[in-house]
Image: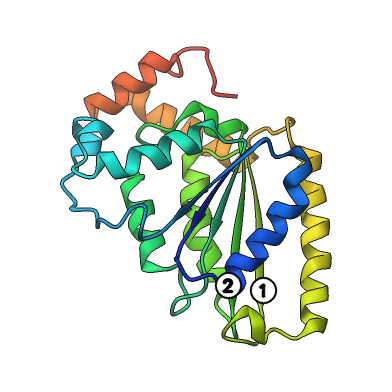
């Protein structure tokens, strides 16, 4: 199993350490793990030029930064996104990356490999905000067509991993073990959810009836999705 991790911050705190626990549990099936750290590996803000929509993703002024992450995600079986809570939402660095993947949303040009992939979203905070932070990332993963999405949010009652009490760490380790087992159980047997399929057919209807964007419609036609082919 190939795993790609995108960390929403370079700070190696509770969210990072919980991610490492997951990687340890999944190690028996992991043939390759690649980690990206934001903003180091993708520091640029989206300019809103719409070139990725109207011309193609190669026309993005930050393509050289975005493409290595895009290619790694395409090859992965499991994608892990991590972000501590920043004012009840994902980190700005994570949002910046997700903005650059707007062209992969279902209405545009979803990558067919996403429909058979798993994703895991991890978030922590000293107090609250994990639900809304996770949703920021899950929204994009869903509209990319991700087959199965797992989530783990935890209030750690501390500002760093060293400050998390041992009782809580034992509970976290137990949670990670259970969720890792579920991920391993689904490996190789992923099918898109009903929500993803409904989104696909809704966008298919739009592309069959209208031509808002010639690049997007041409992509759907080339994939055969306006005919009988499906990405799952």
- Residue 12: x percent and y percent? 54, 70
Q: Secondary structure at mark 1?
A: strand
Image quadrant for the N terminus? top right
- Residue 18: x percent and y percent? 67, 66
Work out whether residue 142 can be spotted. yes
Q: Residue at x 82, y 49 (%)?
A: 181
- Residue 124: x percent and y percent? 60, 73
Above/below status of 41 relative to 189: below
Q: Residue at x 74, y 46 (%)?
A: 27
Q: CA distance from mark 1 to mark 2?
A: 7 Å
The quarter holding residue 170 reads bottom right
202, 54: nearer the viewer: 54
Above/below status of 14 relative to 47: below
Quick check: 14 left or right of 108?
A: right
The quarter holding residue 220 reads top left
Residue receiving disc 1: 154
Work out whether residue 210 can be spotted. no
Say which mark, if any, is on residue 130: 2
| Discs 1, 2 touching: Cβ within 8 Å | yes
Quick check: 57 left or right of 185?
A: left
Say which mark, if any, is on residue 47: none
Q: Report crowding for label 1: few under 14, some 14 to 19, many 20 or more residues within 10 A (C-alpha).
A: many
Task: In the displayed orientation, state which residue is furthest to the left.
Answer: 49
């Amino acid at each position: 199993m190939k795993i790609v991790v995108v960390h929403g911050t370079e700070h190696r705190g509770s969210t990072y350490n919980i991610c490492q626990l997951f990687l340890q549990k999944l190690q028996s099936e992991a043939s390759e793990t690649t980690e990206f750290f934001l903003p180091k590996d993708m520091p640029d803000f989206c300019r809103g030029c719409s070139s990725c929509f109207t011309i193609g993703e190669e026309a993005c002024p930050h393509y050289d930064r975005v493409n290595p992450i895009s290619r790694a995600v395409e090859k992965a079986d499991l994608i892990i996104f991590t972000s501590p809570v920043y004012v009840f939402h994902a980190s700005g660095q994570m949002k910046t990356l997700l903005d650059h993947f707007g062209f992969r949303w279902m209405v545009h040009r979803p990558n067919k490999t996403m429909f058979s992939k798993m994703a895991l979203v991890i978030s922590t905070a000293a107090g609250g905000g994990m639900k809304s932070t996770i949703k920021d990332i899950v929204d994009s993963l869903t509209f990319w067509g991700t087959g199965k999405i797992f989530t783990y949010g935890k209030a750690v009652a501390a500002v760093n991993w060293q400050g998390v009490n041992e009782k809580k760490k034992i509970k976290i380790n137990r949670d990670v073990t259970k969720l890792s087992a579920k991920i391993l159980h689904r490996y190789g047997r992923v099918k898109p959810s009903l929500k993803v399929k409904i989104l696909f057919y809704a966008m298919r209807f739009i592309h069959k009836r209208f031509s808002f964007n010639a690049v997007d419609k041409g992509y759907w036609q080339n994939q055969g999705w306006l005919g009988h082919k499906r990405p799952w």
